Amino acid sequence: MTITKRKMITQAAAAAAALVLPLAMTLGAARAQDKPYVMKISTPTLHDIPDAFARNYGAALEKDSGGRIKVELYPASQLGSIPRQIEGTQFGAIQCEIVPPEFMVGLDERFEVMAAPGLVDSQAQGQKVAADPAVLKLMLGLGADKGLHGAALFMAESSIIVSKTPIRTLADLKGKKIRILASQFQSQALERFGVTPVAMSLGDVLPAIQQGTIDGAVTGVGPVVNFHYIDAAKFITQTNQPAIFLIVEINRKWYESLPQDLRQLVDKDAATQSVAINPIAAKLLKESEDAWTASGGELIKLPPDQQAQFMKTLSSVGADVSATKPRLAAAYQIVTDAARRTRQASTQ
């Protein structure tokens, strides 16, 4: 073979390689895009408002992403207690958690501000506060330096106290050991009525009531019904304070690994579903209350004068707790301003 012919063959091979390499890179990129991004969503409850949101959010993401995001749902603390879910989302073992924000007070004290007693009067008003732009800017930005990306905030329901013995008056609270969510707002509020508050994750509450470690718990009606508290505690006192809000947190590293269009989708669908959940939350609350009484449980309301005294006693808790903490005080001002605006709007 002549030198000229060998040179021609070499040049042809190089040209072919030049065509094949971009094609291979394109196919490789396409295969990478075809691989779905797995999003594990963790909630502490079962058949309740957080899980309804998770189901709807997951379905919306899979549909809107054309299957590029694959959602796995883990209700009832299957991936660990609430503190473990928070850690898992921080460090990437879990991609999304839906929990009351005050459980993250160890990351930033301002996370507990939504648990301030007396903040809202009703589920409907709470949903408006959760949608307030100033509140969203505050709450969704809190975990940014802790490995978290806030995606949505919404109100689930008002708190109740479930107890082994009936709490019909404020005097019945005195001397009780009551589980609270991890919040100084809750602990100081109940201490004013002679209660010993015990911070506890949801999964530990029912065994603690059964064993007599605590006399009752601040929680929502949904968990009480769906985790079958009825055999251990038959009484629910509808104090309606504080409000139980839920925050949707995404692992920041996972979020930032997504293509830009999927990042926008994660935020858009979370915001959409945080509004869509509102009528569902109201419906689930009514169903839970009906189920409780149908199973032999009792719903108790404090007498009107006692409820008024309860609210009066709670009214200064938020300001007192935040008085010596400038960052918490500023956050408290933001949410109370939003509460005042929404309260005024509802009366006009």
Image (spheres, rainbow, N blue to C red):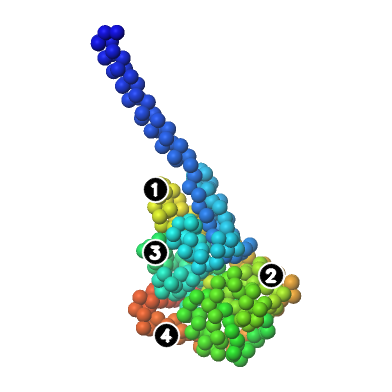
Which numbered disc, 1 or 2, marks the residue closer to the eye? 2
Residue annotated with mark 4: 320
Q: Which residue type does callout 3 highlight? A: Lys
Q: Earlier in the sequence, mark 4 or mark 3?
A: 3
Q: Which residue type does callout 4 highlight? A: Asp
Q: Is residue 338 visible?
A: no
Spatial distance from mark 1 to mark 3, Cα to Cα? Answer: 21 Å
Which numbered disc, 4 or 3, marks the residue closer to the eye? 3
Please tell me whether mark 4 sits on a helix, a strand or a loop.
helix
Q: Which residue type does callout 2 highlight? A: His
Q: Earlier in the sequence, mark 3 or mark 2?
A: 3
Spatial distance from mark 4 to mark 3, Cα to Cα? Answer: 27 Å
Instruction: Please say if the residues under marks 3 and 2 sit with CB atoms less than 8 Å apart.
Output: no
Up-down: is 7 above or below 94?
Answer: above
Residue annotated with mark 2: 228
Residue annotated with mark 1: 260
Q: Residue at x 28, y 10 (%)?
A: 5
Q: Residue at x 41, y 74 (%)?
A: 109
Instruction: Please say if the residues under marks 1 and 4 sit with CB atoms less than 8 Å apart.
Output: no
Up-down: is 33 above or below 82?
Answer: above
Q: Earlier in the sequence, mark 1 or mark 3?
A: 3
Instruction: Choose top left, top right, bottom left or bottom right for residue 319.
Output: bottom left
Q: Assess disc 1: are there few (<14), some (14-19) or many (≥20) residues with their C-alpha within 10 Å of its C-alpha.
A: few
Q: Residue at x 31, y 21 (%)?
A: 14
Q: Assess disc 2: are there few (<14), some (14-19) or many (≥20) residues with their C-alpha within 10 Å of its C-alpha.
A: some
Residue 332 rendering spot, x and y as whole percentages: 41, 76
